[in-house]
Amino acid sequence: MAVKNHRHGALNPKAQFQKEITLEQVLKSALIADPLKLYDCCPFSDGAAAVVIASEEVATRTRKPVWVLASAQAGDEMCLHAKRDLSRALATERAAQAAYRQAGLGPQDVDVVELHDCFTIAEIVATEGLGLFEPGTGGIAAEKGWTALGGKVPVNPSGGLKAKGHPIGATGAAQIAELATQLRGEAGPRQVEGARIGLAHTLGGNTATVLVSLFGRDRA
Amino acid sequence: MSGLSLKEFFDAVREGHLLAQRCAGCRELAIPPKAFCPSCHGKEWERVELSGKGEIASYTIIRVPPASLAGQAPYAVAVVRMAEGVSLLGRLVDFPLEAIKVGLPVVFTPLIQGDQPLIAFKPS
């Protein structure tokens, strides 16, 4: 996960870490909190992002607008010990289901994802919670390269929190900015070919609140 | 009665007692104290004392501590599944770090740091 997100970040001129790392570097890095090592953890970053939201009428007059297809929020207990299942993020599951319902879409329709990979395991749990992979198989999917650029459903082409950086309050808007760039076909060497539907997964407070939004290249 | 304040909860921890709340409506058990029942959103609570017994459900060993705990690392933190069914996060004490395993039985013990009582668990 860390190697993949750094490879993506190396293609993003706005990423904090624009350099590739090796699996050996990751595995040899210092333990932070078992079993997470240095390269499993995202940095805290300085950064800013902005999103311009317009009415349908104004949007149709602008250059390549991106359409909001759904936006849904769900909550959960903040304390780790109060989670019903430590291996799942229930708020992610609920927000994703609500967003898919709003848009009349399913996980199989998603072409590109920006999600909250604060730690490598968080990306695995999130891909499962978003319904991209069955519970327990997100790690295998990542190992097979399905979430890398060129894979079935590229996750975090920006480099994610891990390599693009985590400017806390700006992280969610930065995810949307990346998806807009992707859906406009303007992402250069990190472009997900033919991306039509993008999904943003944004959270705070240890999944106490999760927002899942769907964006379309074309009007719904 | 609408329950237990955080101050009362930690005062009891200091004295070696682990207090929880049981929802008067749906019987959900909650710890530490909450205003609303996470299950039915009720606000009527009964106060109960837990046995303090449980087992390690998951744990980590903090190698790089936050600034407030500088000098204490490495130390272990666990989610403990209490005998009564609720879970609680706490420090593990009196354990050699390499001996910690999921499933080990533990018992609650207060850990006083500075003047602040913290939740901790030791081998039972």
Image: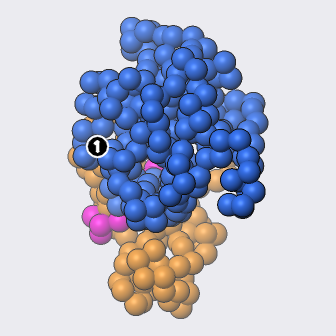
Chain colours: A blue, B orange
Quarter where residue B40 is shown: bottom left
Q: Residues within 10 Å of mark 1 (few under 14, many from 20)?
A: many
- A18 or A186: nearer the viewer: A186
Q: Does residue A59 appear left or right of residue A124 in this picture?
A: right
- A207 or B23: nearer the viewer: A207
Residue range in magenta is B83-92
**Eyeballing the image, is A136 above or below B108?**
above
- B43 or B14: nearer the viewer: B43
Which residue appears at 54% of the width and 54% of the height?
Answer: A219
Residue B74 horizontal/vertical position (percent)? 49, 28
Quarter where residue A183 is shown: top right
- B53 or A66: nearer the viewer: A66
The rendered magenta stretch, by its main secondary structure, is classed as strand
Q: Secondary structure at mark 1?
A: loop
**Eyeballing the image, is B111 above or below B74?**
below
Tell me the quadrant of the picture where the N terminus of chain A can be found.
top left
Residue A68 horizontal/vertical position (percent)? 58, 55
Which residue appears at 61% of the width and 47% of the height?
Answer: A66
| Residue B84 painted magenta | yes
Which residue appears at 71% of the width and 41% of the height?
Answer: A63
Residue bearing the label numbered 1: A133
Look at label 1 and name its amino acid.
Phe
Which residue appears at 39% of the width and 8% of the height?
Answer: A24
Q: Is residue B110 visible?
A: no
Residue B123 horizontal/vertical position (percent)? 31, 45
| Residue A217 painted magenta | no
